[in-house]
Amino acid sequence: IDGDTRMTYAELDRRANGIAQRLRDGGTGHEDVVAVAIPRSADLIATQLGVLKAGAAFLPVDLDHPDDRVAYLLTDSRARVVITTAADVMRLPLVDDVSYLVTDDVTPVTTGPSVVTTGDHPAYLMYTSGTTGRPKGVLITHHALLNQLTWVIDHFGLRGDDRMLHQYSPGFDPHVEEVFAPLLAGAAIVVARPGGHTDPAYLTGLVRDERVTVMDLVPTLLRALLDHTDSDTAPWWGSLRRLLAGGEALTPELA
């Protein structure tokens, strides 16, 4: 669920297959890193899934980061391909020996490439914040990712009728949990618009209107949402059944 876009699992699969086929046709496969520079959206989710279907590892790139950081990530990761949109390609720095694939030019297909991926193959590459030096890339395998997601689903009881909010930046590692845990559980993802994660009025309205049942927030944002008041008589948290909070100190008072 992404604004007016309602994408079924079948539509998501076809979109991801189209991305995967284009990557395979270009020679992308296991051990390759594909940068995904797309704002938070249904298109971002389909593209990341397409990279995995091609057997490669995706590198989330936050388009709001400075050009020098983005250029460093693309160079240091040795990404072969950058996938972006026609509206965002001009926001990216040009890097030598990297090809650019625009999702607007990709046609969804029913059948994806036949690729066998093992648990030891890389699934994604995530960079640290770099606040104490240069960002460092951490390569996560399919086995590690699946282990974490399986635990999240089992421990928190994610179900097929859940709707999980997706509001983290693509470059922040909880983003992966927000996307792939609900997909593995057969649930729905409710995508917050780009920039929406900084607007308490928008987020509380989205949670209420789309009947979000599960969300993961850093405590600072949780505090901001709880402090927000509006004229609607129904509480914005009325549909929630699971609230995860972490990444910062969670005080007893806030809990």
Image (cartoon, helix red, strand yellow):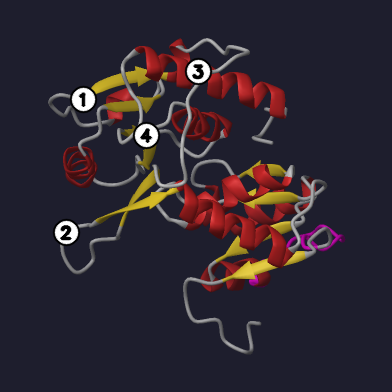
Give the residue type at disc 2: Arg
* Residue ID at (45%, 37%): 39
Label 1: state its secondary structure. Answer: loop
Give the residue type at disc 1: Val
Disc 4 or 3, which lies upstream in sequence? Answer: 4
The residue beneath circle 4 is 37
Label 2: state its secondary structure. Answer: loop
Q: Is the residue under label 3 in contact with that under label 4 (CB below 8 Å)?
A: no
Q: Does the rendering let one see residue 145?
A: yes
State how far apart marks 1 and 4 are (Cα). Answer: 13 Å
* Residue ID at (34%, 44%): 64
The crowding category of the residue bearing disc 1, from other C-alpha atoms within 10 Å (few below 14, some 14 to 19, many at least 20), is some
User: Nearer the viewer's eye, disc 3 or disc 1?
Assistant: 3
Q: Is the residue under label 1 in contact with that under label 2 (CB below 8 Å)?
A: no
The residue beneath circle 1 is 98
Give the residue type at disc 3: Pro
Figure quadrant of the C terminus: bottom right
Q: Is the residue under label 1 in contact with that under label 3 (CB below 8 Å)?
A: no
Camera-side residue of 44 and 221:
44
**Left or right, 210 with reference to 250:** right
Figure quadrant of the N terminus: top right
The residue beneath circle 3 is 113
State how far apart marks 2 and 4 are (Cα). Answer: 20 Å
Q: Which residues are magenta?
A: 227-237
The crowding category of the residue bearing disc 4, from other C-alpha atoms within 10 Å (few below 14, some 14 to 19, many at least 20), is many
Disc 2 or 1, which lies upstream in sequence? Answer: 1
Disc 2 or 3, which lies upstream in sequence? Answer: 3
State how far apart marks 4 and 3 are (Cα). Answer: 23 Å
On residue 134, which mark appears?
2
Disc 2 or 4, which lies upstream in sequence? Answer: 4
